[in-house]
Image (spheres, rainbow, N blue to C red):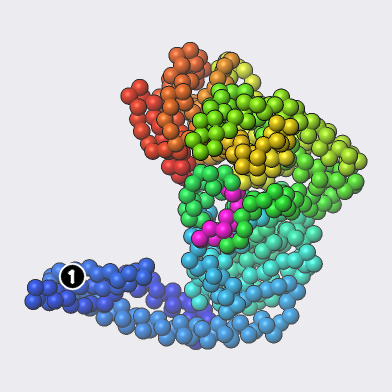
Amino acid sequence: MNEIDTNERINELEKQLSAFPKGSLVYKNINGKRWPYLQWTEGGKSKSQFVKEEDLDTVTAQVEQRKALQAELREWKAQSRKLLKAKTALPHSHEFSTNVRTGESLRRFSSSVLDYRKRECYQTLHDFVYGDIQDRVFILYGLRRTGKTTLIRQILAKMNDADILRSAFVQITVKDTLAGINRDLKYLEEHDYRFIFIDEVTLMEDFIEGAALFSDVFATCGMKIVLSGTDSLGFLFAEDSQLYDRCVFLHTTFIPYREFERVLGIRGIDDYIRYGGTMSMGGVHYNMDQATFATPKSTDEYVDSAIAQNIQHSLRNYQDGGHFRHLQELYEKKELTSAINRVIEDINHRFTLDVLTRDFRSSDLGISARNLRRDRDHPVDILDRVNIESVTENLKKMLEIRNHGEQNVSIQEEHSIEIREYLEALDLIENCPIETAEIDAKPIERILFMQPGMRYSQAQALIQSLLKDAQFAAMSEHDKSVVVERILQEVRGRMMEDIVLLETLKAADKQRRVFKLQFVTGEFDMVVYNEKANTCAIYEIKHSDLIVSEQYRHLIDEDKNVKTERRFGKITNRIVLYRGDDLLLDNGIEYCNVEEYLKSLG
């Protein structure tokens, strides 16, 4: 019996078995009488279902048929395993140009992720692998530690023996070339391999200019080819030049709160603020390493390797390096990676500056100062004495002089614009505009980061380095930590606003606009405007689990409501998103739990 006949028979038997009831027929003694039940094991637990007397003969026959089919299936799978061992030995007698895994080694490679929870995008990859799409390659791309290789391993872990027989996983290194992978794919094609997964394919310097090889040669011959890699920009360049209309894209970089909670098994908006952006929190159901954004050093290493070098590598290999535009001089001076890092830091530092200059002067600071003074165990009055002007000025100076002594080429506005274009292409940043109540007024740019952990880590490090005011330095270490934590609460509050804005924006359909709305004094943290219905919902976003009337004072401000409805239609909902339980107040203000809100966006 050959491999094709074996696979077809296994598939046919599995399809037949799916139509029969699970389990075995057992009898239970209840009140002295024997009653028939179907009994089976599911999720490690024994389950049973009562069988009615009129159905007993039919169920008995079905159980017997199922047992016969299961016995036959075991025999066919045993035959399949023999073929698997024989076929596994065949490629090993061939010297591959690249690192190719086949056969039983794929089982070992994928077995450890069998019980991992799956990201939402898993189904898209699964549908391509087993679907009817032909003549195209699948591009699985995203920044480091966003789950690309794990998705592939999960697909392999769920494969039956018949499909594993026809699968190969290729691990690319910087030494590999298209010529080498071409030789290996030809060999695999000759031996009837159908499912090919090629990891880190963009490491090949000639990938961008020769990527059509995968779609035009091998995908058209019936191979299902999945290309993955961290060089996201390289895939976009390849799609533009070589793979146009011949690829299916799946981007893994954006990890919303609902996935962070469900996949990692960790609940809480504050953990998402600290670590969100990668699948490496050290959670129960995913990568078990240290959180990527746990320390300033690990954050800097991630920015450098996953983002800055990513962009530089792609530009170097696209059109023979002819797409650097204004960044050419920075590249030639070997300062492009540093420049990209500085633009990212600058965006995040200006976010921190905005927190300090806005929140330190707002009523929130007064509330913070009062809370610190009234603390029963450790009252602190430092926020009454700290020189806010000095702290803010130090931050401004730091932004201006940062790294200037190390630069041979100063970063101009055109450099920053082009770098930000690439950051947008990587799905790392997105603009959520700030609108005003004035009709026809131009919106103000507001940059949101897809990876909150990166922003929080950099803001945390910057604040701790800045708070060296003379008054502050004279405090005890305990009091310093109390004040730093209170200021970081302000940062987390602003970041929670950004997270809600970003995820609402990503989930909104074409009929809805999402933005912040500012007035001469005060603002709505978020407005969702339904253009078709000409209605809107207005939101305040509070990093608190308490209900305080001051939180929604803008939502019930008659003047602000009138100006809003004049431009954005009737206000249908007034909502405060916070960290407490859902509650509807007598005045119509809705309090909604922010975590439940974010999960509802899926």
Mark 1 residue type: Val
The structure residue drawn at horizontal position 51% and vertical position 56%, both measured from the top left corner, is 264
Residue placed most toward the observer, 453 or 232: 453
Instruction: Give the total number of marks visible in the rendering.
Output: 1
Characterize the local packing of mark 1: few (<14), some (14-19) or many (20 or more) Cα atoms within 10 angstroms.
Answer: some
Q: Is residue 323 above or below residue 392?
A: below
Confirm whether the magenta stretch covers residue 560.
no
**Where on the picture, by quarter, is residue 338?**
top right
Q: Residue 92 at what x, y percent from top left?
A: 67, 83
Q: Residue 383 at what x, y percent from top left?
A: 62, 29
- Residue, disc 1: 51
Q: Residue 384 at what x, y percent from top left?
A: 62, 26
Q: Is residue 382 above or below residue 248?
A: above
Residue placed most toward the observer, 227 or 442: 442
**Where on the picture, by quarter, is residue 192?**
bottom right
Q: Is residue 261 above or below residue 395?
A: below
Residue placed most toward the observer, 181 or 456: 456
Can the viewer see residue 173? Answer: yes
The structure residue drawn at horizontal position 55% and vertical position 46%, both measured from the top left corner, is 272
The structure residue drawn at horizontal position 59% and vertical position 68%, both measured from the top left corner, is 195
Q: Tell me where the magenta segment starts and ends, as one range.
A: 275-287
Q: Magenta stretch mostly in which secondary structure?
A: loop
565 with respect to 136 (left or right): left
**Where on the picture, by quarter, is residue 135?**
bottom right
157 with respect to 473 (left or right): left
Q: Residue 594 at what x, y percent from top left?
A: 46, 38
Confirm whether the magenta stretch covers residue 280.
yes
The structure residue drawn at horizontal position 75% and vertical position 60%, both measured from the top left corner, is 203
252 with respect to 568 (left or right): right
